[in-house]
Image (cartoon, rainbow, N blue to C red):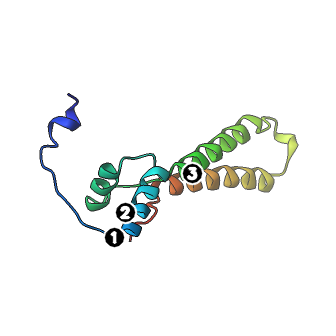
């Protein structure tokens, strides 16, 4: 028995419409979570990040690392203003990836 299973001793029943139940199943599938885990995260205000957002954030991270790797080391390749724009782009990519991971689809 894992640590999480040992503490989950209470069961709560809930009635909902067929449409609501299907929507909940789709949301759980999108986030790669069980329905129970999705509900637990929502009621405890934890982050619920969709699989698509996570994959997009990972791709953005890869782009940022590639840009850092391709950054020319010599001073003659561009003006200081161009170098500043380059690093601003890398920083914006990192912030975008972080925002995607922190998003909570379907949360109020």
Image location of residue 18, percent across then percent down: 37, 67
The numbered mark at residue 21 is 2
Q: Is residue 91 above or below residue 71?
A: below
**Quadrant the N terminus occupies:** top left
Label 3 sits on a secondary structure element that is helix
Which mark is in front, 3 or 1?
1
Q: Of 23 and 66, which appears nearest the observer?
A: 23
Image location of residue 3, percent across then percent down: 20, 33
Give me the C-alpha separation between circle 2 and circle 3. Answer: 21 Å
Q: Are marks 2 and 1 in contact (CB under 8 Å)?
A: yes
In percent of the image, x 15 and y 51: which residue is there?
11
The numbered mark at residue 52 is 3
Q: Of 20 and 85, which appears nearest the observer?
A: 20
Q: Residues within 10 Å of mark 3 (few under 14, many from 20)?
A: few
Q: Are marks 3 and 1 in contact (CB under 8 Å)?
A: no
Q: Are marks 2 and 3 in contact (CB under 8 Å)?
A: no
Chain-order first, disc 2 or disc 3: 2
Task: Residue under label 1, please give it.
Answer: 17
Label 1 sits on a secondary structure element that is loop
In percent of the image, x 55 and y 53: which residue is there?
53
Image location of residue 16, percent across then percent down: 29, 68
In percent of the image, x 36 and y 47: which residue is there?
34
Image location of residue 45, percent across then percent down: 30, 60
């Amino acid at each position: 028995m894992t640590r999480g299973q040992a503490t989950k001793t209470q069961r709560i029943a809930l009635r909902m419409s067929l449409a609501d139940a299907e929507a909940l199943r789709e949301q759980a599938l999108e986030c790669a979570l069980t329905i129970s885990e999705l509900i637990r995260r929502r009621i405890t205000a934890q982050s619920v990040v969709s699989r698509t957002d996570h994959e997009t954030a990972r791709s953005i991270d890869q782009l940022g690392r590639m840009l850092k790797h391709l950054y020319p080391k010599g001073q003659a390749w561009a003006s200081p203003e161009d170098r500043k724009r380059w690093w601003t782009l890398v920083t914006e990519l990192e912030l975008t990836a972080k925002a995607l991971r922190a998003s909570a689809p379907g949360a109020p």
